[in-house]
Amino acid sequence: MAAYLVAGSPRGEAELKISRITTWSVDLPLVRPYSLSGGRLKFERLDGTIVKLDTDDGVVGWGEGTPWGSTYLPAFARGIRVGVQELAPAVLGLDPRQTDVVYRAMNLALPGHPYIKSPLDMACWDIAAKAAGLPLCDMLGGRTQGSVRLHSSIPSGTPSELMAEIDINRSEGYRFHSAKLGADVEADIERMRFLDAEMEPGEEITFDINRAWLPSEAVAVLNTNRDINRVIEQPCETLDQHLQLRRLVGQPLAIDESLQGLGDMLRIVETNACEVIGLKVGRVGGLTVAKQIRDVAVQAGIRMNIEDTGSTSLGATAAVQLAQATPEPFRRATWLCFDHLTHNPVEGGVTNDAGFATAPAEPGIGAYPDEAALGEPFAVHAT
Ligand code: MG
């Protein structure tokens, strides 16, 4: 396991400066090809970026930015690596424990592009927690009781294909499934009814449409299946469409892709748009922003799936640290994307323990990329 410093340095007294930024590209093939929304998105591998921050004090921080393919969200996988190079001069020399100061410096250097900032922000939080000698969850509000429930991610397909995937995930301990629908109205009516009836006592399922329905299609499916009272996730493209839909259907709604920052969260609360949000660390721009959104959601009584957009166990563990610092019942579930990968070049971190994950107790995120497995860096910037 990689080394981290927990004692012996004059933390809180001396400055701590980011002295080097190393960026790697990681190719992450999926165990099985994945389809969203009736096959409109299909891919076989993820393009990940791992970032390491060195400090002049020897404390090291790790961050990750891995989109769930480049077609799911406004994210350009290769662009993350180039964007980090754009941000590097603004971040070098800053104290990584001052996460808001670093974030404002990144916003000045590169407006927008939140997903590019997430790996650098994540690495700063890793260092801040290591420097404090605390697990990251204790920097994000404090460890809460229990473990974080996992949800599966079931790719779109025929009813039998969906059930075959659910059975694989059941064998791995999952009791909460997120099934991807979004083909045509008749097929989705059938698939919802079929999967709902197949759920065993104690199992839970969410139907995730990933923006595929027009409002009229959503109304047709959901009102035909009005007796199925399951959470329906991101049925349409925009928040305004969800507000329109909300007046016409009875099922609880979740907003995922339409939540891209704190401003979206404030509007969600103002308009009473949903009961659940998908809080994806990479999409909103990192742990700094995700924590702000988490705090607003708790205040508003909205439950959260707290996870990353896709990741090795580094990004997943960082997300679980935030979830672990979020009390029940607001902490609904998290997703371990790395369960879908053929290899995971990271040591330590969270594991799937019969459908639950627990944030590591050591200082920092608690997950350590294997530098030898990462190979030659994409780029190195140093002071
Ligand atoms: Mg979703």
Image: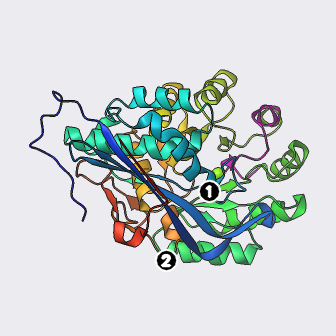
- Indicate whether 279 appears above or below 159: above
The disc labelled 1 sits on which kind of residue? Arg
Q: Residue furthest left?
A: 8
Q: Nearer the viewer, residue 32 or 353?
A: 32
Horizontal and vertical percent for residue 247? Answer: 81, 32
Q: Is residue 182 left or right of residue 8?
A: right
Horizontal and vertical percent for residue 303? Answer: 53, 39
Which residue position is annotated with label 1?
78
Find residue 171 and name its label.
2
Q: Nearer the viewer, residue 283 or 297?
A: 283
Q: Nearer the viewer, residue 286 or 201?
A: 286
Task: Report the span colored magenta.
Answer: 227-244
- Indicate whether 263 appears above or below 257: above
Q: Residue furthest top?
A: 270
Horizontal and vertical percent for residue 315? Answer: 45, 54
Image quarter where the C terminus lies is top left
Picture residue at 35% right of the left edge, 34% below the top: 93
